[in-house]
Amino acid sequence: MFIFFALPFLSLVLWSVGKDWCWPRIFPAQFSGQAWRYLFENYDSMGEAVLTSVLLAGTVTLIVTVISIPASRTLALDHFRGKRLIEILIFLPIIVPPIAVVMGIHLIFIKLGLVDTFTGVVLAHLIPTTPYMVRILKTVYAFVGRKMEEQAEALGANGWQTFWYITLPMITPGIITGGILVFLISLSQYLLTFLIGGGRVFTLPLVLFPFVTSGNRPLAAVLSLLFTVPGIFMILITEFYLRRRYADIDLYFV
């Protein structure tokens, strides 16, 4: 697994400083910092793209989490007529390719006045990301069940206290796992961001793709490495939080 991750990453690093690298050479014939120089010379636009991407993905993650917590609980623990149909509709964006419906979404957003706006892009990103969070939290709720909540209510806790002190701590690992996945999916969206944002919502994929298709491999490699930074940073923060959280729990029960 490490090899499958390390080799492409090493290739990107070499391409970012390489020049005249073609088969069958193992390493570039020449090395150059021109691509990195371009990145730092255009740090204003690149910084704007990174900031917009992180803000967009963070907003989408927050909204999806708020929507998915009650939705997944209902789907996991309640039984009602039409439940299977609702599940199919929620998980449909995972099955249907985005390109098959993106033009319809674009037309609807034009009528609603949401095209070329940050809000419109956020709403568009909810479509491919929500099913993943709902699926993860549904599994978590099915495993956790109702027993702990019922015991808390029997001891006099109200609904908010039960959720805050009992339910939320138990589903937090699922929220974090789903949140990372939602963040990365939103961060990597190109087609929805391009069509709904109209080029005004300037994110990293919109910067990266033209260079990838133009054949400028060193610059594409530099931007690809930049593209990995927000995701890696988020995973490191999450890892630090989880280690601190569960270390405190272990100390509490020792």
Image (cartoon, rainbow, N blue to C red):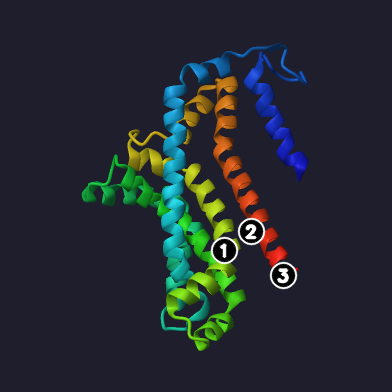
Amino acid of disc 2: Arg
Q: Secondary structure at mark 1?
A: helix
Q: Which mark is residue 253?
A: 3
User: Splitting the image into 4 quarters, where does residue 10 fall?
Assistant: top right
For image coordinates 63% across by 45% down, the residue present is 236
- Name the foreground residue: 107 vs 234: 234
Q: Are marks 1 and 2 in contact (CB under 8 Å)?
A: yes
Nearer-N-terminus badge (1/2): 1
Relative side of 4 to 212, left or right = right
In front: label 1 or label 3: 3
Describe residue 228's horizontal placement relative to residue 73 as left or right.
right
What residue is disc 1 on? 172
What residue type is disc 1 on? Answer: Thr
**Of 35 and 169, the residue lying toward us:** 169
From the top left corner, tell me how far across and down residue 186 is, in percent.
47, 47
User: Which residue corresponds to the image point at 60% horizontal and 46% vertical from the top-left?
Assistant: 237
The residue indicated by pointer 2 is 245
Estimate how packed mark 1 is, as few (under 14), some (14 to 19) or many (20 or more) residues with alpha carbons within 10 Å: some
- Mark 2 or 3: in front is 3
